[in-house]
Image: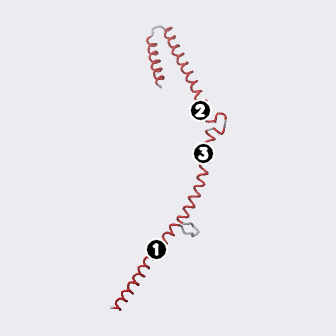
């Protein structure tokens, strides 16, 4: 980029000098030299671009081996993602139906946990009732003894 800018500035200065020249012959010769340098630079840049295009082409199309091309690798990647997504989707559906149940009336883990929590709360109440009855019987027994 810096070389291009220096080249542009150099050409610009030389063109300004051509405008100041009094002789048409000298002006035409100077313009021809500038045109020649521009052409030489353009040829060098085209050669460089051709080489870069060749390298990119080899990378894109696998350097003669279609299996190593970017297109083939992208296709393989897409296929792998599709397989992973398909398998993962089924796993997610299984986990989802296990957690929240399904439309067939099968209860999920969340429903079962809620039932177990209610059962646990009821068992705690029954336990306290049983303890209260035992304590009450003991108190009555003690009162009869006294």
**Vertical order, 70 against 91 (above or below):** above
Q: Locate residue 92: give its quadrant.
A: bottom right
Residue 84: image location, x then y, percent: 59, 52
**Vertical order, 65 against 98 (above or below):** above
Question: Of the residues under marks 3 and 2, which one precedes in the sequence?
Answer: 2
Q: Which element is circle 2 on?
A: helix
Does 41 sit left or right of 126 as displayed? right
In the picture, the quarter occupied by the C terminus is bottom left
Task: Confirm or deny contact between disc 1 and disc 3 (CB under 8 A).
Answer: no
Question: Of the residues under marks 2 and 1, which one precedes in the sequence?
Answer: 2
Identify which residue is drawn at 57% across, 61% down.
Answer: 94
Residue 105: image location, x then y, percent: 57, 70
Does 38 sit left or right of 66 as displayed? left
Which residue corresponds to mark 1? Answer: 120
Closer to the eye: label 2 or 1: 1
Identify which residue is drawn at 60% across, 31% down.
Answer: 55
**Real-space Cα distance between discs 1 and 3?**
51 Å
Question: Of the residues under marks 1 and 3, which one precedes in the sequence?
Answer: 3
In the current view of this chain or complex, which residue is farthest to the front?
145
Identify which residue is drawn at 48% across, 26% down.
Answer: 1
**Vertical order, 88 against 109 (above or below):** above
- How crowded pointer 1 is (Cα within 10 Å; few <14, some 14-19, many 20+) is rated as few
Q: Locate residue 86: give its quadrant.
A: bottom right
Q: Which disc number belongs to residue 77?
A: 3
**Vertical order, 118 against 97 (above or below):** below
Which residue corresponds to mark 2? Answer: 56
Identify which residue is drawn at 59% across, 27% down.
Answer: 51
């Amino acid at each position: 980029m810096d070389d291009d800018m220096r080249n542009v500035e150099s050409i610009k200065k030389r063109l300004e000098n051509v405008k100041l020249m009094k002789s048409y012959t000298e002006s035409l010769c100077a313009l021809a030299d500038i045109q020649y340098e521009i052409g030489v630079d353009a040829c060098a840049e085209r050669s460089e671009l051709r080489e870069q295009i060749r390298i990119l082409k080899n990378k894109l199309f696998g350097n003669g081996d279609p299996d190593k091309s970017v297109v083939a690798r992208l296709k393989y990647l897409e296929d792998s993602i599709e397989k992973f997504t398909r398998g993962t989707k089924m796993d997610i559906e299984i986990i989802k139906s296990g957690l929240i149940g399904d439309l067939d009336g099968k209860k999920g883990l969340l429903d079962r946990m809620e039932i177990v929590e209610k059962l646990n709360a009821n068992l705690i109440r029954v336990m306290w009732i049983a303890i209260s009855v035992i304590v009450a019987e003991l108190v009555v027994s003690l009162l009869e003894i006294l």
